[in-house]
């Protein structure tokens, strides 16, 4: 079946008892067993370990990413934590993209380093830089592509080839493009991570995360952490995410078309001095974007002439766009990474990797593009 068909039908079937077309919300802590000898004969015992509603979402995401299996979590950060915990122990080392979500950087540097895990943050746009950062004790390569918020890309094939030669798993945060536009496992990666909060939900209604493993061994290790740590997704969140996922392709195509128009508008605006969007020919890695993905997504980064104060003035002046943390939703959201999503990254490190104080991140929604452009234009006129 085609991808758009799988978005709707993968992992779900009509309820066998009632014929309900939507997967029921199995809001139950525990599941009664037939007998001691038939323990787990129906597959479920306690919702921390597995829940039928959550399992339906896990099966769907497995199919969409082309993986071995999937585990779902309470947040995207919990999903990242499960990968780190399953791959790394004290005294071991990971290579991580230098541009990544601020929460990823915080988790590595403020939590795991306290327990003796080492991290090297490298320019993962350079496969050679990744290669050179690998040590004898390296047990994980973690890349985020496109990276939040600069949109820097990692050549997934090249880095996965390096990882395979070294027998190190390569985990890819695929939140920005989703499997509709980019499928890292097909490009050689071993693990895919998502904040389901973003495009799979799409409506600012839930927070959640998912990890899709490409092999049984990796899935078993990650699943052990999911059960042991207990940071599971709730049945209600899974149910809402199942509904949001059905319209992913329609939403993302429209959002991406809007984003292309808006990026071209911003690029031509006299008060904007830099625009980063995968779909622009001026984007430094435009050709790589075309070679490893089927679309360019809905996130744009830009800088306004006049620096920090001008950028803040624009974000405080928009009326249709909402100043809020999140992305991938039907509403257009505007964010100041330096003080919002990446506030925990040291100022010197932020500037080194291109997250300047004046950088603006725009997650384009489903509104009419002409209205989003008009809103941005009136805000820029006030600079």
Image (cartoon, helix red, strand yellow):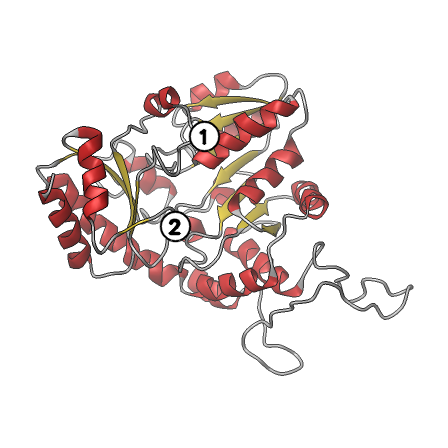
Quadrant of image for the C terminus: top left
* Residue 63, position as x, y percentages in the image: 54, 57
Quarter of image, res 374? bottom left
Residue 2 visible somewhere in the drawing: no
Q: Disc count in the image?
A: 2
Quarter of image, res 285? top left
| Residue nearest the observer in this picture, 352 or 127 | 352
Residue 58 visible somewhere in the drawing: yes
Residue 260 against residue 284 in the figure, above or below: below
| Residue nearest the observer in this picture, 23 or 189 | 23
3D distance between C-alphas at marks 1 and 2: 19 Å
Residue depicted at x 37% and y 34%: 153
Disc 1: which residue: 158
Residue depicted at x 71% and y 48%: 227
* Residue 348, position as x, y percentages in the image: 36, 19
* Residue 118, position as x, y percentages in the image: 58, 21
Q: Residue furthest bottom?
A: 18
Q: Which mark is residue 19?
A: none
Q: Marks 1 and 2: which is nearer the front?
A: 2
Disc 2: which residue: 181
Q: Residues within 10 Å of mark 2 (few under 14, many from 20)?
A: some
């Amino acid at each position: 079946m085609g991808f758009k068909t799988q978005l709707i039908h993968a992992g779900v079937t009509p309820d066998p008892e009632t014929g309900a077309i939507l997967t029921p919300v199995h809001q139950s802590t525990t599941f009664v067993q037939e007998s001691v000898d038939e323990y787990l004969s129906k597959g479920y015992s306690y919702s921390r370990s597995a829940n039928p509603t959550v399992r339906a979402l896990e099966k769907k995401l497995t199919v969409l990413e082309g993986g071995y299996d999937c585990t779902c979590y309470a947040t995207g950060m919990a999903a990242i934590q499960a990968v780190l915990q399953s791959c790394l122990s004290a005294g071991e080392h990971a290579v991580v993209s230098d541009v990544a979500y601020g929460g990823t950087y915080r988790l590595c540097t403020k939590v795991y380093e306290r327990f003796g895990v080492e991290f090297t943050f490298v320019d993962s746009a350079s496969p050679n830089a990744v290669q050179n950062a690998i040590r004898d004790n390296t047990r994980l390569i973690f890349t985020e592509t496109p990276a939040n918020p600069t949109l820097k890309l990692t050549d997934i094939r090249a880095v996965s080839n390096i990882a395979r030669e070294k027998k190190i798993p390569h985990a890819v945060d695929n939140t920005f493009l989703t499997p509709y536009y980019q499928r890292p496992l097909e490009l050689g990666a071993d693990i895919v991570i998502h904040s389901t909060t973003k495009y799979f939900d799409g409506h600012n209604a839930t927070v959640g995360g998912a990890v899709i493993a490409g092999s049984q061994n990796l899935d078993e290790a990650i699943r052990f952490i999911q059960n042991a740590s207990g940071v599971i997704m709730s049945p209600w969140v899974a149910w809402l995410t199942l509904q949001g996922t059905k319209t992913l392709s329609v939403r993302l195509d429209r959002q991406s078309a809007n984003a292309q128009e808006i990026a071209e508008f911003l690029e031509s605006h006299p008060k904007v001095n830099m625009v980063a969007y995968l779909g622009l020919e001026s984007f430094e890695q435009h050709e790589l974007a075309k070679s490893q993905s089927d679309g360019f997504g809905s996130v744009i980064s830009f800088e306004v002439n006049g620096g920090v104060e001008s950028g803040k003035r624009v974000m405080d002046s928009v009326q249709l766009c909402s100043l809020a943390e999140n992305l991938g939703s039907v509403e257009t959201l505007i964010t100041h990474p330096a003080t919002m999503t990446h506030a925990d990254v040291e100022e010197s490190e932020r500037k080194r990797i291109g997250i300047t104080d004046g950088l603006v991140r725009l997650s384009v929604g489903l509104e009419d593009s002409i209205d989003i452009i008009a809103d941005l234009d009136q805000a820029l006129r006030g600079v």
